Amino acid sequence: MKLDLLLKNGNIYTMEYEGKKVEALGIKDGKIVFAGTDKAAEDYESRHTVDLGGKALIPGMADSHMHMYAYCQNQTFVNLEHARSIDELVATMSIKAQETPQGNWIKGVNFDQTKFVKNIFPTRHDLDKISTKHPIVVKRCCLHAVVANTSALEITGVGPGYDPGSGGIVEFEEDGYPNGILKEQSTRVFDDIIPDPLLDEAQKRKIMLEVLGHMSSKGVTSIHTYAAKIWQYNEDIDTYRDLDASRELPVRVTVYMDELFNPEKLTDKQKSDPYRLTQFGGYKIFSDGSLGSRSAALYEDYSDAPGEKGFVLYSQDEFTSNVLKAYESGLQPAIHAIGDRALDMTLTAIEQTLEISRSKGMTQKEQTNRLPFRIIHVQMINDSLLERMKKLPVVLDIQPIFLCTDYRWIEDRIGPERAKNAYAWKTLKDAGLIQTGSSDCPVESFDPISGIYASVARADKDGNPPGGYGPEQKLSVYEAVEIFTKNVHYATGQQDFLGTLEVGKFADIVVLDSDPFKSSESDLKDIKVNQTYIAGRRVF
């Protein structure tokens, strides 16, 4: 057999189990056909040979939960992630206002008030300092809260006595006028009216190719991207298929929708095709909001806001009905649950869905053969919730990089006792639950090396807090790499084709400039990607 590509003289971590290494990989027709020693590789002839010079290789890395469309939209808005005060936010937005025609909308994204010198939300009065001639909206990094200036409120009709409706929050001043802060479902009043910058197909294609290329440079070979029509994040699989048809798509893309659709029927041949880069995933369902905006649903009050518990978006019956409807349609439910009360509701919905399906004639074997339920975030647990999860067919999509920011305020928000069971990755791992690594981009960076570092160090890039936050919940380097490689593909039922570097699997490979398994904890964050391959084709 003549190989298409031979990679030799490497420290190739197959990720089949901890410590498993080979020296060489042979690739033919997009799949690995040889994994072994350099000596054994001499028996193969290859069209192309790469001497790795002893560099470390791991399987292609993945992001199991992100919003690609949102991130691409954000490339056209004002980025506020570096603002460290309301004054800095105002100054940054003012530059945009000076170059924007009066009357046109101005949107800022990625602000995080917890990083401000004073941890307080801006209000309409702060944004009015930017301009009263432009409608202005800034969106918090979590995507669950916005602040609008007076002009934006007037245009959208958000005034005294405004009813935000079910699932929405509008904050009011003492005189009854909105203060400009809106959360959850209320925020869509702006998303429905602000022009989508990606409606121009040429601009959308340009931005997407730039973003996808950047992903390849970070070793990302697979993403699971989620639509969110509440915020006009309108994922369209045809966009990715068009890029694939022109051989410009450097990343495998699974698209999850937030409305019911007819699931794809893939043949065994299609499933085993390494060059099939796009597919539909399942159905996204929200149960609550975020901790950063205090809209995540908790059993008990927020420690820094007595009387507030966040809220769930549905009654239990409504929520179970939504999950059941998706499941009976043949779709994989993917459920956003951050607070402990929201996780309780989510587990109840899954338990009831399985029970109702069995009562209607679905066998245990049929349920076992279904894709697992996905629970997204799982930021707060307790012993009871953990025991229930262990009995269910679930995969947990976590975002380790969240902790790099959240450690500064999490104990203030939920108190030290509940914080002990927050971001409890080691506890979940030891319970036998499969966790997948992600970023929730644009909430945080999609760079998986940053996620691996966060999983191991539980600290920010400066090493704070010293020793890591809740060090007993640290993952080992192997466990951290595992959640960003092999584990992700259990969520989509592709574990037989992706996630480890074994004979017969797709040749998605990342070459690193240094060995993560021989690096110190602090050095993990500085590892760079040298090369990225997808189905044996070098894309970076």
Image: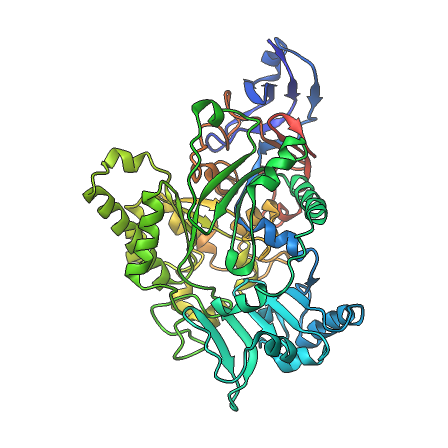
- The image position of residue 419, as x and y in percent, is 42, 64
- Residue 250: in sight, yes or no? no
Indicate how the structure is coloured in the image: rainbow
Residue in front for this viewpoint, 116 or 284:
284
> Along the horizontal axis of the image, is 426 left or right of 133?
left
Image mark count: 0
On screen, 382 above or below 127? Answer: above
The residue drawn where x is 52% and y is 24% is 273
The residue drawn where x is 42% and y is 63% is 288
Q: Residue furthest right?
A: 99
Q: Quadrant location of the C terminus?
A: top right
Q: Quadrant location of the N terminus?
A: top right
- The image position of residue 267, as x and y in percent, is 44, 25
The residue drawn where x is 40% and y is 79% is 306
> Along the horizontal axis of the image, is 528 left or right of 223?
right
Residue in front for this viewpoint, 277 or 484:
277
- The image position of residue 190, as x and y in percent, is 58, 68
- Residue 535: in sight, yes or no? yes
Q: Quadrant of residue 38?
A: top right
Q: Quadrant of residue 358?
A: top left
On screen, 278 above or below 126? Answer: above
Q: Quadrant of residue 34?
A: top right
Q: Residue furthest bottom?
A: 175
- The image position of residue 455, as x and y in percent, is 52, 50
Residue in front for this viewpoint, 299 or 139:
139
On screen, 477 above or below 92? Answer: above
